[in-house]
């Protein structure tokens, strides 16, 4: 009983294993009346025991004790065993104990075998002594487990503090900076001269120095192939657990290099290498366990950082992809509120992201697009597409609304993709206009050939009729009673001749005389010819003619006739009720070259929508029968086309019609 009380007193007096072990060894030796003892502990793999402490021995045995040589009955029965010939059980230990017989005390915790206490005993112990030494063995187990638990708790605390510091460094800087701070802290924790972290570059099949407590060592770029059989970083990458490579110095001190593999759930992350760690006899197992724990904790932290970095990088790549799209992309949740929009959408909306996020998608678009968004709200799993002109997003768009579905097909929102087709729409309009002009030109060309033939055939008999009528008028060789009828016949024949001449002009039979011509002068002459009639009808003429207008190369008479026809058309549209004709000449750039624009606006009733497509067709007129031939605007169209220009007509927003003539400026 006094001996058990002494053990309890020793266990409660201190929790320092260095202080407890000598006391426990002394108790064990005293119980069996021996002189020395050695404590062997299993290594991490359980295949060997190594001497970790002793009593009455100058040096610890360096050779491991293979587990297969331990008597089977020792751990099977769990009771101390007296061995007469120690050399048959473990080689070399008898020399250290200075005896060939010893008591083997198994050290077990539940079903876990911790080691064996070997107590040198020259005389076989009694049953009472065996029971007493077994109690000492239990005290050893308690001391080892308590010390291990305390060390593990202390290690966990230090590792937690170290990894928290690592986490703070990573969140505020970069992974490399966080690892550098971790290396410095690990140096203190493991009493190493230098700690380095090498990360695995899978694509290059290299391990790369990413951080070190030694700034000079880190200054040089260091990369090692994963297949290298000499580099500690590469060797550690291939290990399953921490390992020590030790070396003994001339002064008898022992240091070692600790390599710790850093492994994630699916791949190797890298290696931590600690150099010049001070090793104490029997401390290797504890150091390796601490290294393994460090590796587990650090691997998890690094993998989390790498995964977060991968997620953030993937998100940036996704955002960059969407921002690179010319199409407008917006995503809304089930409540219709915006959760994402790309740069193109923001630029078109003209609003910053923070003003749109969490706002209803319908608030950022025009009314027509708002309608289809509301329709999309009742869609199940079908996409909806429409062509919409949106004033808010400033353009014409091909809009596609697609339901956003989750992994299990549940609705999560709506994806809007709007492709700007404004240039395409404008191009189609220009193509349609070109097609119309081509059709018009083809019709005029075909009709011109037909009209030219008829005009030439009609012109000869008409000239004969006019000649004979002129002769009859000169000679008076007809009754006076027929004079008025003769005048009417002559007037109508002359009108027919003018129509024929106009037909010849329309058909292009008249050869152009091209020379430098002022459109201001041609327009002024046309207005002067109609000035008396315009004054009589109460029509005011307002001129806005640009000074210094460049000249065009063309036929002055034909250009004057074309402008006169437009003025006549405006005059007839206004009628006798009075009104105003405005003329304007300007020079503007059009498709990279200077063009002269002549505009003639009247205050008449405007052009009927049904008449607009046929306005320049020959023989088409909106005037009453007998008041127009329908050739004036057709002839004007032909003259402008012959000069390489363009003529168009439209209704003015304030009323009346506007005719616009566009002619190229003379080059040189």
Image (tube, rainbow, N blue to C red):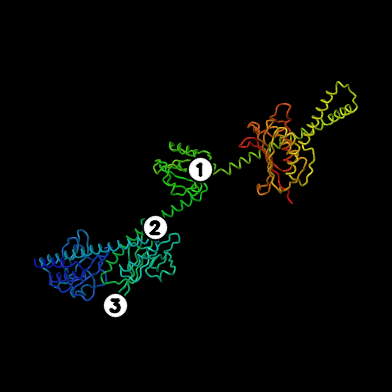
Whether residue 410 sits left or right of residue 142 in the image: it is right
Q: Mark 1 points at which residue?
A: 392
Residue 451 at x, y = what percent? 77, 32
Residue 193 at x, y = what percent? 34, 71
Using a 10 Å C-alpha cutoff, classify the residue at mark 3 as few (fewer than 14 neighbours), some (14 to 19) or many (20 or more): few
Give the quadrant of residue 59. bottom left
The residue located at (46%, 53%) in the rendering is 317
Q: Which mark is residue 252?
A: 3
Q: Tag 1 or tag 2, which sits nearer the N-term?
A: 2
SS for callout 3: loop
Q: Mark 2 points at which residue?
A: 306
Whether residue 540 sits left or right of residue 58 in the image: it is right
Q: Tag 3 or tag 1, which sits nearer the N-term?
A: 3
Using a 10 Å C-alpha cutoff, classify the residue at mark 2 as few (fewer than 14 neighbours), some (14 to 19) or many (20 or more): some
- Residue furthest to the left in view is 1
Residue 121 at x, y = what percent? 15, 72
């Amino acid at each position: 009983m006094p001996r058990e009380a002494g053990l309890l007193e020793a266990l409660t007096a201190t929790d320092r294993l260095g202080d407890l072990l000598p006391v426990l060894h002394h108790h064990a030796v005293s119980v069996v009346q021996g002189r020395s003892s050695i404590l062997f502990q299993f290594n991490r793999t359980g295949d060997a025991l190594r001497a970790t402490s002793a009593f009455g021995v100058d040096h610890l045995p360096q050779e491991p004790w293979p587990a297969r040589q331990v008597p089977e009955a020792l751990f099977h029965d769990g009771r101390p065993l007296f061995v007469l010939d120690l050399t048959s059980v473990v080689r070399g230990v008898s020399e250290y104990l200075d005896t060939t017989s010893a008591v083997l005390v198994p050290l077990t915790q539940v079903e876990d075998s911790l080691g064996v206490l070997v107590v040198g005993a020259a005389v076989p112990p009694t049953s009472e002594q065996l029971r007493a030494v077994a109690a000492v063995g239990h005290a050893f187990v308690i001391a080892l487990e308590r010390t291990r638990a305390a060390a593990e708790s202390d290690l966990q605390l230090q590792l937690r503090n170290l990894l928290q510091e690592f986490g703070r460094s990573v969140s505020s800087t970069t992974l490399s900076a966080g690892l550098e701070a971790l290396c410095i802290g690990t140096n203190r924790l493991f009493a190493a001269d230098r700690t380095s972290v090498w990360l695995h570059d899978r694509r290059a099949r290299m391990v790369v120095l990413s951080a070190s407590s030694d700034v000079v060592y880190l200054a040089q770029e260091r990369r090692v192939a994963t297949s290298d059989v000499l580099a500690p970083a590469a060797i550690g990458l291939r290990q399953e657990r921490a390992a020590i490579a030790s070396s003994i110095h001339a002064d008898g001190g022992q240091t070692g290099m600790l390599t710790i593999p850093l492994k994630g759930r699916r791949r190797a992350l890298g290696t931590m290498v600690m150099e010049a760690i001070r090793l104490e006899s029997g401390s290797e197992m504890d150091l390796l366990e601490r290294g393994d724990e460090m590796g587990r904790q650090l691997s998890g932290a690094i993998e989390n950082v790498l995964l977060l970095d991968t997620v953030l990088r993937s998100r940036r790549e996704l955002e960059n992809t969407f921002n690179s799209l010319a199409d407008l992309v917006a995503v809304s949740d089930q409540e219709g509120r915006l959760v994402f929009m790309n740069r193109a959408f923001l630029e078109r909306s003209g609003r910053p992201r923070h003003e749109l996020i969490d706002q209803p998608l319908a608030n950022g678009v025009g009314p027509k697009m708002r309608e289809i968004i509301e329709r999309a709200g009742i869609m199940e799993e079908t996409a909806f597409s429409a062509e919409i002109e949106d004033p808010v997003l400033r353009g014409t768009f091909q809009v596609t609304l697609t339901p956003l579905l989750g992994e299990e097909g549940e609705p999560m929102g709506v994806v809007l993709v709007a492709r700007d087709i404004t240039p395409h729409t404008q191009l189609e309009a220009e193509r349609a206009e070109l097609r119309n002009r081509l059709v018009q030109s083809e019709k005029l060309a075909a009709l011109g050939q037909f009209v030219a033939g008829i005009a030439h055939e009609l012109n000869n008999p008409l000239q004969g009729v006019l000649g004979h009528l002129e002769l009859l008028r000169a000679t008076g060789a007809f009754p006076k009673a027929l004079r008025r009828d003769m005048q009417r016949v002559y007037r109508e024949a002359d009108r027919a001749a003018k129509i024929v001449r106009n037909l010849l002009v329309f058909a292009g039979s008249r050869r152009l005389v091209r020379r430098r011509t002022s459109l201001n002068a041609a327009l002024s002459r046309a207005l002067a010819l109609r000035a008396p009639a315009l004054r009589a009808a109460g029509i005011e003429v307002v001129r806005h003619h640009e000074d210094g207008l460049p000249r065009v190369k063309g036929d002055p008479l034909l250009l004057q006739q074309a402008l006169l026809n437009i003025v006549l058309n405006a005059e007839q549209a206004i009628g006798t009720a009075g009104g105003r004709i405005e003329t304007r000449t300007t020079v503007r750039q059009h498709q990279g070259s200077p063009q002269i624009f002549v505009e003639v606006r009247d205050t008449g009733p405007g052009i009927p929508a049904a008449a607009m497509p046929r306005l320049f067709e020959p023989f088409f007129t909106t005037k009453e029968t007998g008041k127009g031939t329908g050739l004036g605007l057709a002839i004007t169209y032909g003259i402008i086309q012959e000069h390489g220009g363009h003529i168009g007509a439209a209704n003015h927003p304030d009323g009346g019609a506007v005719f616009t003539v566009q002619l190229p400026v003379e080059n040189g």
